[in-house]
Image: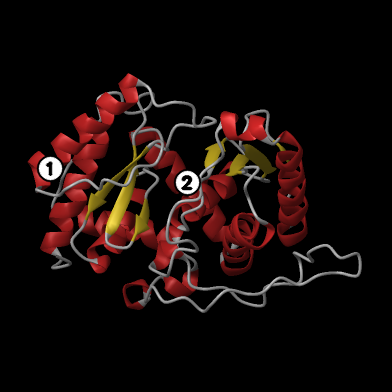
Amino acid sequence: MPDRSDDYELLEARLKTLLPEEYRDSYEDVQPVSMGSAGLKFGRDGRVAWDKIWGSFCDLAMAGGPPHRGTLLEAATRADIDLDRGHYRQVVDELCRGVEMATGLAAEPSSISGWIHVDCPSTSMAGWLVRAINMENISAHVDGMILHLPAGPRFRLEKEIKNVITSIAKTCHYWLGHTSVAQHRAIADLFKVMESESPLIQAPFSARNIRTAAFEKLRDTITAKIHSQTGLEATACEYHGWLGVSCLNVRAAIWMMRVMVASNVLCRREGNFIYVPVNPSTDRKGDRIAALVARAHRMARAQRMI
């Protein structure tokens, strides 16, 4: 997409299409303040009653609310899974049970180690959920109508398992309860337009094996390009498939994150850092990610976010 004077209006219109109606004229006023975490509830069988826990949810991170987690929850490595396959199967079973109870969507173990997959009724729902869930700092990957969510043998019931189930319960709540059928159609049309401009860029989908030289080189290349074009620095905190970029303040980070997502790039926030995908398959030279970060930065400055 060319860098034009009307970019702000175009991206704002896209964001308003993506956001539930109650946020459309107020998202600039949403504060990243948490309501607090709901406690677990148990049924008569002693298992967590995942369909009875939540009466309400914090604002969507997509709208500027607090991410569900402060840092990214990643899928386990194959090596970690191999060390405790028995517990890993228990975690996967509980994740699938919880997702189905909390959302009504079918969930199954993935053929890719470290993930479960969730069947969505449409590509637009899966595409919206993957954007929203990543912004809650839970790893997610989309492939058509299949949404993949992370799993690992070290996931604890009251922590990581609950994090995953809460993230999809929260985002499904907003998709199913706060967006209309007409908006679903508008979102589907928007995704088609964005896909025609450039395919969705998301972090590589894998079991987080050892980083390759190609990944390391691309990450360093994108870092240098972003710094050259914006003066922004990368973070020393690394995640597989992600590069963190300092945005100077939280307000700018929230705004730039939303601009990236409205440009068909998965993006998330930790404090005043945004994290963008590093994917040699979909952005081989890193030119698109670097250019979009630079554009978001210029627009943030123009809007006096920085």
Residue 187 vs 112, above or below: the answer is below
Q: Is residue 193 visible?
A: yes
Image quarter of residue 258: bottom left
Residue that sits furthest to the front in the current view: 83
Q: Amino acid at mark 2?
A: Asp
Percent x, y for residue 84?
69, 36
Residue 221 vs 72, above or below: the answer is above
How many C-alpha atoms fall within 10 Å of the one at disc 1: few (<14), some, or many (≥20)? some
Percent x, y for residue 163?
59, 59
Q: Amino acid at mark 1?
A: His
Instruction: Say whether disc 1 or disc 2 marks the residue closer to the N-terminus.
Output: 2
Residue labelled with disc 2: 189
- How many numbered circles are shown? 2
SS assignment at label 2: helix
Q: Is residue 147 left or right of residue 298?
A: right
Percent x, y for residue 262?
35, 51
Measure the C-alpha gap from mark 1 to mark 2: 34 Å
Residue sitting nearer the eye, 29 or 166: 166
Q: Is residue 6 visible?
A: no
Percent x, y for residue 104?
75, 56
Residue ID at (65%, 33%): 83
Residue that sits furthest to the top in the current view: 213
Residue sitting nearer the eye, 241 or 260: 241
Residue ID at (55%, 41%): 75
Residue ID at (20%, 38%): 223
Q: Quadrant of the N terminus?
A: top left
Residue labelled with disc 1: 227
SS assignment at label 1: helix
